[in-house]
Image (cartoon, rainbow, N blue to C red):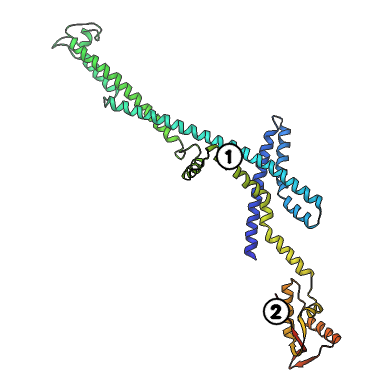
């Protein structure tokens, strides 16, 4: 009994949670219908939310109306439940569709960004591999300055002074200026490599900041689509997406609309059984009429007849009276109908009677 009560209580809490979630979704849906006016938004939102809460009570009202044969109330409860369920179903799948498409769009943006960054990363790595290791731009600049500071010949002026830093085409410094020109090309490549390394670091940092768990715009949709492809089912992804939304809507509607009524079934049935047992008392005369029959020479002790009486009461959901009261009533009945009685030791016997066939 305690286990059943605990399970029912868990079910009630879960059902109330579904009702609250469904009511909140309906509030958000109605809130959006209110447009820009704050009062109307609140009115629509609260109206849809309260209607969803009342919807959860309609199965109880419908069942009670049927037992009382209040047909107007039964029709009203069924009609309200149907209208509120359709409205809530529409609101639920509408909001779910918006969120699903928004999530798919966000995931698509992450995937596109990752693809672009990976493409750029590969391009930068390829360029750095082509350039090779040239040292830093500062190191190349120092090498160039050292070449300018060298004399073009022993005991002569430096290359920088003689050629005005290679701006003049002098025969004596032509070879040195050609080498410096090659170093300037190396300097540009070193600067390019440094920029590429800096950009590569930024790209790798950006890739690390992306959510690595996002591998698909809609993973659930992709998995179900693949399963359907195993069986060559001719379904488009749009059809699968619609089916998922309808399933979510049905889950919320059935859970919030019928969940509370369904999980309380053990309590409601127990209450009915308890009420039946407590309002009908097993009558000794009715028992005797149903169970006793004339049997010449038959003998039934008081213990035997009371045990059969208790079984008879349980079979009919009756409350059994106490043994002493039952035996007193049966003795009175025996005197009225002329049933012989006697003593067998300390036990009372009813004679020339027997019990009928076994109880069902």
- Is residue 320 depicted above or below 264 in this figure? below
The answer to which quarter of the image holds residue 197 is top left
Residue under the image location 82 percent in, 79 percent down? 285
Mark sitting on residue 358: 2
Residue 187: where, in percent of width, then height? 28, 19
Residue 49 in the figure: left or right of residue 220: right
The answer to which quarter of the image holds residue 194 is top left
Residue under the image location 79 percent in, 71 percent down? 280
Residue 259 in the figure: left or right of residue 161: right
Q: Nearer the viewer, residue 233 or 210?
A: 233
Residue 54: where, in percent of width, then height? 73, 47
Residue 275: where, in percent of width, then height? 76, 66
Q: Which secondary structure, mark 2?
A: loop
How many labels, in total?
2
Residue under the image location 52 percent in, 34 percent down? 106
- Is residue 143 depicted above or below 334 in this figure? above
For disc 1, the marked residue is 242
Rate crowding at label 2 as few (under 14), some (14 to 19) or many (20 or more) other CA atoms within 10 Å: few
């Amino acid at each position: 009994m305690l286990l059943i009560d605990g399970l029912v209580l868990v079910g009630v809490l879960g059902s109330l949670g579904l009702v609250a979630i469904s009511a909140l979704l309906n509030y958000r849906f109605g809130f959006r219908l209110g447009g820009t006016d704050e009062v109307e938004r609140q009115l629509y939102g609260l109206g849809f939310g309260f209607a969803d809460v009342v919807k959860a009570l309609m199965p109880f009202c419908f069942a009670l109306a049927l037992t009382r044969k209040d047909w107007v109330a039964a029709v009203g409860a069924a009609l309200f439940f149907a209208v509120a369920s359709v409205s809530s179903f529409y609101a639920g799948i509408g909001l779910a569709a918006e969120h699903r498409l928004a999530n798919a769009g966000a995931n698509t943006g992450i995937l596109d960004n990752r693809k672009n960054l990976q493409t750029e990363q590969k391009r930068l790595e390829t360029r750095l591999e082509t350039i090779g290791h040239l040292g830093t731009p500062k190191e190349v600049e120092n090498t160039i300055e050292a070449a300018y500071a060298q004399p073009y010949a022993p005991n002569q002026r430096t290359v920088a002074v003689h050629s005005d830093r290679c701006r003049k085409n002098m025969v004596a410094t032509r070879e040195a200026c050609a080498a410096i020109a090659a170093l300037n090309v190396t300097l540009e490549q070193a600067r390019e490599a440094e920029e590429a390394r800096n950009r590569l670091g930024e790209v790798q940092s950006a890739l690390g900041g992306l959510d690595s768990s996002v591998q698909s715009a809609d993973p659930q949709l992709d998995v179900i689509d693949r399963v359907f492809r195993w069986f060559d089912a001719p379904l488009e992804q749009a059809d699968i997406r619609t089916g998922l939304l309808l399933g979510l809507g049905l889950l919320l509607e059935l859970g919030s609309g019928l969940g509370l009524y369904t999980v309380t079934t053990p309590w409601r049935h127990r209450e009915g059984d308890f009420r039946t047992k407590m309002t009908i008392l097993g009558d000794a005369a009715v028992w005797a009429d149903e169970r006793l029959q004339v049997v010449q020479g038959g003998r039934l002790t008081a213990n035997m007849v009371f045990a059969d009486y208790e079984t008879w009461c349980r079979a009919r959901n009756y409350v059994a009276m106490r043994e002493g009261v039952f035996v007193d009533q049966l003795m009175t009945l025996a005197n009225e109908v002329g049933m012989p009685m006697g003593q067998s030791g300390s036990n009372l016997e009813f004679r020339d009677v027997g019990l009928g066939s076994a109880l069902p």
